Amino acid sequence: MRQSNKNSLKTPATRFLDQRHFPYEIYECTGEIEGTAEFMANFLGVPCYEVIKSIVFMDEKYHGYMVLQHGDQTIDTKLLRKILGVKSVRAAPYDYAHKWTGYEFGGTSPFGIKANIPIYAERTIFEMESLFINGGKRGVNVKITPDILRQIGVIPVEVSK
C-alpha cells in the first residue's frame, strides 16, 4: 500500500476536503488498476466492506442522484425508487454522470462534484469507525470518518439487496 503525500496529489475531491479542513489520509495505487471495490480492498489490505462505492443514478425525468454503498453489497433499485419517490431509476450513462460529478467512471467521489445532486449512503456506513472512498481519480482513495459524510449532508438510507 502506498500512502501518498496530500500535497503531491490534488483532485477536485481532495481540494474540497482541504478547503473545509476535513481530515483524511490519501492512498494511491499506480500501475494496472481495475476500477472495482474488490481490487481496491486487496490493494489497501482491508475488507471489501470498508471500501465504499459512489454510484450515480438517474430517474425517468433525468434527475441525478448519488448513492454510496459498501463494496461487497449491491443496491436494490426497487427500494431506491421508493425512497426517491420516482417511477424508475437506473445507473446514469457516462455523459450524465460525468456532467453532474466532473469525474470519470472508476474515479467518482462524493466530494467536489459539479452539480448539486442529492447524495445518499447505506445507513450502516455511518456506523463505521473509518472507511475508504474514491478520492477523485481511478486508483486514488481517501480514508475518512463517516462524520465527514454527515457534515456534507449525505442522507442515510437502507438500499442493500
Image (cartoon, helix red, strand yellow):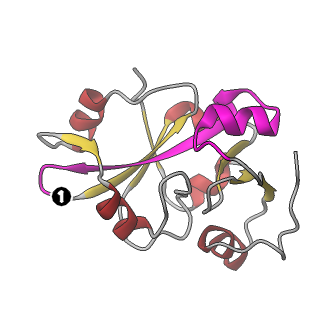
Q: Is residue 87 above or below residue 42?
A: below
- Is 26 on the left-hand or right-hand side of 103? right
Query: Can residue 112 be seen here?
Result: yes
Quadrant in the picture for the N terminus: top right
In this picture, which residue range is highlighted in magenta? 33-61
- Is 12 on the left-hand or right-hand side of 153? right
Query: Can residue 126 be seen here?
Result: no
Q: Which of 72 and 84 is in front in this view?
A: 72
Splitting the image into 4 quarters, where does residue 34 fall? top right
Is residue 35 found inside the magenta-colored segment of the image?
yes
Splitting the image into 4 quarters, where does residue 20 fall? bottom right
Q: Where is residue 101 in the image (x, y as percent from the top left)?
A: 43, 66
Splitting the image into 4 quarters, where does residue 6 fall? bottom right
Q: Residue furthest top?
A: 161
Q: Position of residue 29 (x, y in %)?
A: 77, 51
Is residue 124 found inside the magenta-colored segment of the image?
no
Q: Where is residue 129 in the image (x, y as percent from the top left)?
A: 75, 38
Q: What element carries label 1?
A: loop
Q: Is residue 88 above or below residue 64?
A: above
> Would you call the spot at circle 1 few (<14 residues within 10 Å), some (14-19), or many (20 or more)?
few
Quadrant in the picture for the C terminus: top left
Q: Which residue lies furthest to the front in this view?
A: 32
- Is 156 on the left-hand or right-hand side of 7? left
Residue at position x 62%, y 61% from top?
137
Q: Which of 90 and 117 is in front in this view?
A: 90
Q: In this view, does 46 lie above or below 10?
A: above
Amino acid type indicated by mark 1? Tyr
What residue sits right under mark 1 in the picture? 62
**Number of marks in picture:** 1
Residue at position x 24%, y 28% from top?
78
Q: Where is residue 87 in the image (x, y as percent from the top left)?
A: 11, 40
